[in-house]
Amino acid sequence: MNVPSFPIGPVRSVEGTAVVLSGDDIDTDRIIPARFLKCVTFGGLGEQVFADDRLERGGAHPFDLPEHQGARILLVNRNFGCGSSREHAPQALMRWGIRALLGESFAEIFFGNCLALGIPCLQAPHGRIKALQSFVEANPSTAFRLEVDAARLHSGDGQAWPLDLAPGPRQMLLSGQWDATGQLVSHDRELLDTAARLPYLNAFSTD
């Protein structure tokens, strides 16, 4: 498992190696099985991501292979993140170390939950994703740079793959507007001033 460092503020690029998870319709119950949803915090979810799939494959799952430890970009196929709308799924991926996903398509709620964590989900046609997955499987140590503004993936050897990202999510990532908590903290003074003017918060003040 990777040592997580969480996104803060604008997300303009993601750098690192990639890991491939092939297959359509991989749902949130596979990403993080339901028995792990009883946790009080998200803290330990990274260790349990794809728990059942990894157990079934006995150490041969992509997330267990030595060459993929430290990977930050996840390559998937069609309708990734479908099923129940649990926010634990992108939390588990993020806490394992994933900072961006590239795929053919994503379930809408999963996409939104990723965006709320500052995790870009970019798309490309089937053929391009399959070619990129094949490249990564043949070259697992290759470092990549994902440019959010240009919606483009660059490899260390000079190759590049165009991707798709809608203008709304792109702007939220580039501006840092995806980070609702950060926006609140940055307006701390205004929030305190507003609270001080609310009669129902100050009805019992002794000042």
Image: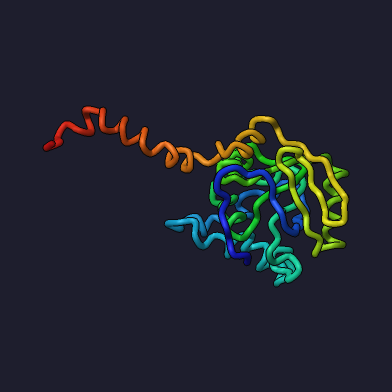
Q: Quadrant of residue 109?
A: top right
Q: Above or below — where is 27 with respect to 164?
A: below
The residue located at (14%, 35%) in the rendering is 204
Query: In terms of depth relative to the viewer, which is nearer, 143 or 126?
Result: 143
Q: Give the residue at x 73% y 65%.
A: 68
Q: Position of residue 13 (x, y in %)?
A: 69, 47
| Quadrant where the image shows the N terminus | bottom right
On the image, the x and y values in percent for residue 45 come to: 54, 60
Q: How many marks?
A: 0
- Residue at coordinates 59% horizontally, 65% vertically from top-left? 3
Instruction: Report the front residue among 133 and 185.
Output: 185
Which quadrant is the C terminus positioned in? top left
Q: What colour scheme has been applied to the protein in the rendered image?
A: rainbow
In the foreground, 157 or 29: 157
x%, y% of residue 5?
A: 57, 58
Q: Position of residue 119 (x, y in %)?
A: 63, 46
